[in-house]
Image (cartoon, rainbow, N blue to C red):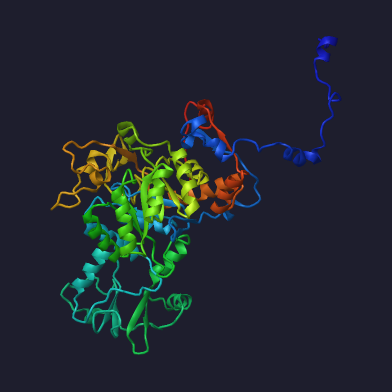
Amino acid sequence: MAPTASSTSAVPSTSAKALLDPADALGTLASYKTGDGLSMDELIDSRQHGGLTYNDFLVLPGYIDFPASAASLKTKVTRNVTLNTPFLSSPMDTVTETDMAIAMGLMGGMGVIHNNLSAEEQAEMVRKVKMYENGFITEPLCLSPNAKVGDVLDIKQRLGFGGVPITDTGKIRGKLLGIVTARDVQFRRPDVSVTEVMTVDLVTARQGITLEEANTILRDSKKGKLPILDEAGNLVSLLARSDLLKNQNFPLASKRPESKQLYCAAAVGTRPSDRERLALLVDAGLDVVILDSSQGNSMFQVEMIRWIKSTYPHIDVIAGNVVTREQAATLIAAGADGLRVGMGSGSICITQEVMAVGRPQGTAVHAVAEFANRFGVPVIADGGISNVGHIAKALSLGASAIMAGGLFAGTTEAPGDYVYRDGKRFKAYSGMGSLTSMARKTNKISGENAATQRYFSEEDTVKVAQGVTGQVTDKGSVLPFINYLYTALQHSFQDMGVQSLEQLRNNVKVGTLRFELRTASAQLEGGVHGLSSYEKTLYK
């Protein structure tokens, strides 16, 4: 049917109001009083919006003028420690021990070894991480000519390597006589002298050689070890071929600059016995100590921070946990080099439910980071991270890095045995406030337990759980998973239009990076919906 006069008159005429010239689009945009969306201050307004979690908001996209691969994720996690990726594994007894700490270091992050075990066991784990990768090994383990094959086998079993220099004194700076390799002791009786099996046809380098030059000699010689000798032929350091391979395979590995060893952190409490524990950890090569408490704003933590900074000034201290700037101020004033933020936000934590204390994680991270960054103290967002988007949001809120437990639990490198149920493979995952973790004795003599100390409940007759025990599906190795997190986070930065954490913080500060609140229906829209079934594969 042909349109009537009345129906055609309802259609607006383009001539009634002249359209703007497309060339003036940017100029017209500049005429708006504010940018699209919300600034950070407008987003994080507890009086208007209440406390926010990561799911409650989105970051609005920026302008892309660089490839995702150009985005740098390098970040400071303490005043003095810089990592190449902003990932830390949580100090939980079902998340971080030796294997996880090594993997995190190789992938540019840092593992935090839990303290729900004896001090000696924890120190041995730190030592294994520190000995896993080196530049010049300045204090190599040596044996004397009186040693036996059994001594070498014991070293390999305990420490994981089999190339041991033999010096006349059995110590570094003794005259080098030979090297016993893993192949030298294969099929040999334990009582055979090392002098009968050691390799004496050695390629060596003179003291003063650069690491690059030494690596070239090691590569061309096809030897497993390169001893570095002084003019008198005494051993002063060692270089390992295995470390060359690690450098090639893991270019992002975060290492202490002077020793080229992987960074390693460990958790301790604030009791008198923890001072003895820390002494063993420092002797093992510890870089960063984390004071592990669900509520860090206490006289116990203040006293511990001051003692550590006066006794071990070279050790950086990450204090916490905190969720308010008042808590943060106490610990910063005491000398903390970094802060953990989070209380009750973890997937297996029930602190908010049981104690009625805590704070939504998004609001907590912003409040503490805004305050702590004024003093140059980095903030670590601990808890509530279940996907890459949460990591990106935590960083946009001001965190320098994230710490996760559930994200890394169930991987090959996580402690624990696999169990099978309904044809699927699982690993246990326990909150440190769970009764399972509280039942584990870290000191059989005193009966101490790190989990009860963390929640100030070691003297309670009734143990009040602040966590649960569950199971997570087998995730395979953490190495490709972290690589996925790294690459996905680079793409997230690209969508935001920022190439580094520094630029991210600056754009948030000046208001060019904008945000949007999400309603419940908006959150539903942002996930998979409208399908009868689907398969969600995150990476290949």
Please identify the residue farthest to the bottom as the structure is shown: 232
Residue 338, image x, y percentages = 41, 53
Location of residue 236 by image quarter: bottom left
Work out whether 384 lies above or below 275: above
Location of residue 218 by image quarter: bottom left
Residue closest to the eye, 62 or 215: 62
Residue 36, image x, y percentages = 65, 36
Residue 266 visible in the current orientation: no
- Relative placement, left or right, of 377 versus 462 is right
- The residue lying at 21 percent from left, 68 percent from top is 154
- Relative placement, left or right, of 385 versus 36 is left
- The residue lying at 24 percent from left, 68 percent from top is 155
- The residue lying at 37 percent from left, 42 percent from top is 406
Placement of the N terminus among the 4 image quadrants: top right
Residue closest to the eye, 278 or 86: 278
Location of residue 83 by image quarter: bottom left
Residue 57 visible in the current orientation: yes
Count of picture labels: 0
Residue 220, image x, y percentages = 45, 77
Work out whether 101 lies above or below 154: above
- Relative placement, left or right, of 537 versus 27 is left
Residue 175, image x, y percentages = 29, 86
Work out whether 8 lies above or below 368: above
